[in-house]
Image: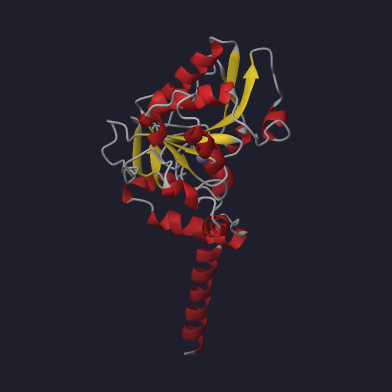
Amino acid sequence: MFYKILILTVSLFSMMSCSHNLPDFTTRLSSRLPTDSKAEAIGEYSLGCLKGAQTFSGMEKGLVLSQMKRGRYWGHPDLIKLLSRAGEEFYNSNKKIIIGDLSQSRGGPTLSGHNSHQSGLDVDVWFKILTSQDHPSLRDLETKEMKPIDELGDDQLKLIKFMAQDSTVERIFINPSFKKKLCLNSGSLKLTAEEQHKMRAWWGHDDHIHVRIKCPSDSPLCVPQRPIPAGNGCGEELNWWFTDEAKAESAEASWAELKSLYLEKIIKLPAQCSFYSDT
Ligand SMILES: [Zn+2]
């Protein structure tokens, strides 16, 4: 009897400790290769994974990668193509854009930084725009150079407009204060109703925009997000972002909260994402 209790206790303890231990995913996942298969975005933007992820060839024009050690520079080919087109556009005026996180090599949740970016269809692009003569070090791109901005200048507006005009782009998350400025100056900035519609206010995002592309046609298991409500996003819903309620919701999650959310997501990933945790 004693041994039975002991075994039960030990196995219960090991189950508990197992479920409370973080898998060694953070470093391992970022350094693994993508699956060797046709590219496919699976599941939701905030609960999914990515097969056959692609990255940049290094020959793209007008693009600079930042935060490379995070290993989140993998995406669906549609996303890589979009960024290549954007880089080309800026290259033609002797400028370069700085790319932040896309997804991990097999997509999936991350412990820090993002709720979404899980299926290779999300990317952060920094507001800081470089000239073709700028060659910041990787260290600069991770720290001091990447500051929030106060105003949207011509370069930032060009970036926003380029993304909003692209037919593959589903929505763009932008700081509420910037969204307000875009709404107030819609006419002088020559923003169409469709472009305004795609730009949605979201917390943070004062140093970058977050661009989300549509579910690609080659990805039947990709789950589209609920459509953006009709309208230009400049009405009552924008005012909410300046309320105390909105500010309260922006409070940073604690490490313990991040960790349990991460574990919860790993468990809830679609069955087709089982390759995510394969070695
Ligand atoms: Zn983002």
User: Where residue 194 sits: x, y (%)?
Assistant: 35, 30
Q: Quadrant of residue 125?
A: top right
Q: Is residue 58 above or below residue 222?
A: above
Q: Is residue 173 above or below residue 66?
A: below
Q: Residue at x 62, y 35 (%)?
A: 69
Confirm whether residue 123 shows in the render.
Answer: no
Q: Residue at x 43, y 23 (%)?
A: 82
Total marks shown come to 0
Q: Residue furthest bottom?
A: 1
In the depicted view, which residue is nearer to us: 232 or 53? Answer: 232
User: Where residue 153 sits: x, y (%)?
Assistant: 60, 25
Q: Residue at x 62, y 34 (%)?
A: 67
In the depicted view, which residue is nearer to us: 46 or 74? Answer: 46
User: Where residue 118 sits: x, y (%)?
Assistant: 44, 43
Judge from the rendering whether residue 241 lies leftward or rightward of residue 147; answer left or right: left
Q: Is residue 108 above or below residue 82?
A: below
Confirm whether residue 206 shows in the render.
Answer: yes
Judge from the rendering whether residue 103 lies leftward or rightward of residue 214; answer left or right: right
User: Where residue 170 sits: x, y (%)?
Assistant: 37, 34
Q: Colour scheme in the image?
A: secondary structure
In the depicted view, which residue is nearer to us: 14 or 43? Answer: 43
